[in-house]
Amino acid sequence: MLDTKSLAVLSQALEKLDSGFGNLPEFKARSFDLEQFAQVLNSTAEKLQNNFPYFHPLYAGQMLKPPHPIARLAYALAMYVNPNNHALDGGRATSALEKEAVAGIAAMFGWREFIGHLCGGGTMANLEALWVAGQIHPGKKILANEQAHYTHKRISGVLQLGFESVHCDVRGRMDLAALEGRVKKGDVGTVVATLGTTATGSTDPLVEILELSKRFGFRVHVDTAYGGYFKLVTNLAEPARKAFEKIGEADSIVIDPHKHGLQPYGCGCVLFRDPGVGKLYKHESPYTYFSSTELHLGEISLECSRPGAAAAALWATQKLFPLVTGGEFARGLEAGREAAIQLYARLKNDERFVPAFEPELDIIVFLPNEHSREKAAVRSREIFDAAAKSDLHLAVAELPARFWSGVPFASSTETVSCLRSVLMKPEHLEWVEPIWERLLQAYQDTKSLA
């Protein structure tokens, strides 16, 4: 199942890398016991078997997409040098690769003039975006969809900025009336628009949020850590398509290459439309920046040491798969989206299940059709366990019951435990039928427990 054929390519590339240092005098590296080395590595492999098969199409639970072999190999290749992309002294080649790779992501959103860099992940990237927002609008509040990632509330607390959640509609999108009513108070500095919420993949109405920002003067930060690459696809419904088309009008953007970008964890990216925000990062280090007058990435980053290997992996991946509409990379996203559409259609047309709403990206949330929310929640967990026994791995999420507004549940509870499926692998399109078969079997296996 796991790719090993590409290891021969890594060996060739390693020889190429090694030849670049052939002029150095030989030295004796510390030796190690190869037999003991093999024992420990095999023991590690055995420990790693205690994982779900994240790489397989039957894993459709969380946002876990295997890195492409080119990313794995480029990362491994760079690790032989172990560059640090904080300063050019520590990562001369990989800093150049990072700048080029990040420029490619910015270009996907229509930006040529910008400032940005890679981060350890979406949390650190959003931290930087909200830190800049707080510097520009000191003391003003941050607003985000109640279905936005919890990291925004946590980050706001770290930055000592006020934070408030905005009510969402029955499709998980920020409620515009609620937002307008709140920003009218005049104490809001930034609104976070999420394009691809973690739970449901919903997209906030960015077009209208941008219009409100013109009227009320707040910054717009787009957290599209999960959904950003869908800017390239052609099979989105109109509301989501219009939102993605407007990303380039935001003040800042966060996207995670380690989600849909085929990268190993952790690889996030933060972008600012105004390069002038770089002055906010200004600091003086007596020992770090001395080798070059060029921009050191540490001069525009809150993080200090960062793996140059992540930049090498991202650069290599984008070299192999350019970020263009109609390209192989974009078609892979479209395949996952189509898989979600097909699975949703099966759920909608089967009386045994009740999907919340049509997916905007590639995430579906649904319930078994029961007479009460309490029973639906219990049955969801039973189906989750039963499906896993046939190697179908879903997820369970706790979501607002109003997402199933058309279902007359006999209950007053505000949330319900439901099933969630993330069909983010291109291969999922070919596996819709096996997934469906196992889901129906899990339903049948738990019927006797009802």
Image (cartoon, rainbow, N blue to C red):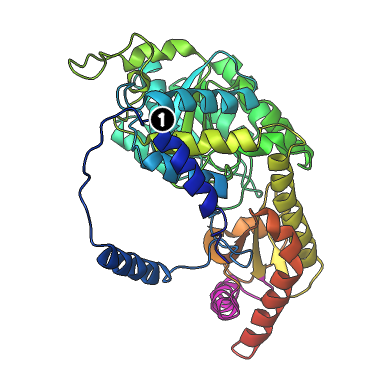
Residue type pointed to by label 1? Gly
Report the residue that reaches farthest toward the right.
Answer: 349
- What secondary structure is the stretch in magenta mostly built from? helix
- On the rendered structure, is 159 left or right of 356? left
Identify the residue shown where x is 80% and y is 61%.
Answer: 345
- On the rendered structure, is 443 left or right of 417? right
Residue 58 location (% of width, % of height): 62, 68
> Height in image: 256 above or below 115?
below
Q: Is residue 412 visible?
A: no
Residue 27: say if magenta: no
Residue 1 location (% of width, % of height): 58, 67
Asked whether 256 or 369 is in front, the reply is 256
Residue under label 1: 20
User: Can you tell which quarter of the image residue 51 is in?
Assistant: bottom left
In the image, which residues are magenta? 368-391
Identify the residue shown where x is 69% and y is 70%.
Answer: 435
- On the rendered structure, is 334 left or right of 251? right
> Height in image: 134 above or below 440?
above
> Which quadrant is home to the C terminus?
bottom right
Badge 1 element: loop
Identify the residue shown where x is 61% and y is 41%.
Answer: 227
Q: How many marks?
A: 1
Using a 10 Å C-alpha cutoff, classify the residue at mark 1 as few (fewer than 14 neighbours), some (14 to 19) or many (20 or more).
few
Report the residue that reaches farthest toward the left.
Answer: 286
